[in-house]
Image (cartoon, grey):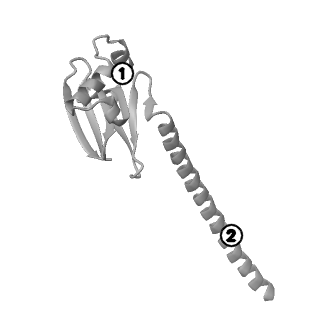
Amino acid sequence: MAKKAVKKVSKKEEQMSEKTEKTVLVLLVIIIILLAVILGIVLLKKNNNVVNTNDSNYKVDVDDNDDGIKVTDDIIDNQTTNDNKNYISKDNAISIALKDLKLTKNDVYDLECELDREFNQTVYEVTFNYKNLEYEYYINAESGKIIHSFKELD
């Protein structure tokens, strides 16, 4: 009679052991998935937030204050952005943005300018900080016209 009681305890221990093994495996899979997501975010930031496909580059925004990744509809078409000689220069786009606020390059910091695709047109996205504000300008790459601008607290 004593042997049967020992076997029942042993079966319960086996069942508990199997459940524990399954739980550990599920946790390991979750950890691996989380590490892959974190690695993907780090690599996106390291590669200037551009994901390459066969014929286009998609801009990916990773917001440090948000838990999400936003793939924007901004497509940087290599042929359109690199081969068109009718575009104004980056320096000209920067000058247009700064002139709008009556500022010079020496007045601002963190000045960046990149060719992008926004508002269904090729634009220069000019960003910079002045005092405690961050400014963003979208300037049509062909005409030099300011398409959109805004500012926010830095």
Q: Residues within 10 Å of mark 1 (few under 14, many from 20)?
A: some
Work out whether 12 lies above or below 122.
below
Looking at the image, which residue is at 20% across and 30% down? 100
Q: Judge left or right: residue 134 versus residue 101.
A: right
Identify which amino acid the numbered label 1 is placed on. Answer: Asp
Judging from the image, what secondary structure is the residue with disc 1 in? loop
Judging from the image, what secondary structure is the residue with disc 2 in? helix
Q: Where is residue 24? Give x, y as percent.
A: 63, 62
Earlier in the chain: of badge 1 and badge 2, it is: 2
Q: Judge left or right: residue 19 versus residue 140.
A: right
Tell which of 75 and 153 is nearer to you.
153
- The residue under label 2 is 17
Looking at the image, which residue is at 66% across and 64% down? 21
Identify which amino acid the numbered label 2 is placed on. Answer: Ser
Residue 77 marker: 1
Q: Judge left or right: residue 69 versus residue 137.
A: right
Foreground tag (1 vs 2):
1
Tell which of 7 and 30 is nearer to you.
30
Q: Judge left or right: residue 71 versus residue 98.
A: right
Extreme-bottom residue of the structure = 1
- Spatial CA span between label 1 and label 2: 56 Å
Looking at the image, which residue is at 21% across and 18% down? 143
CB atoms of marks 1 and 2 within 8 Å? no
Q: Where is residue 61? Give x, y as percent.
A: 38, 40
Tell which of 129 and 78 is nearer to you.
129
Q: Residues within 10 Å of mark 2 (few under 14, many from 20)?
A: few
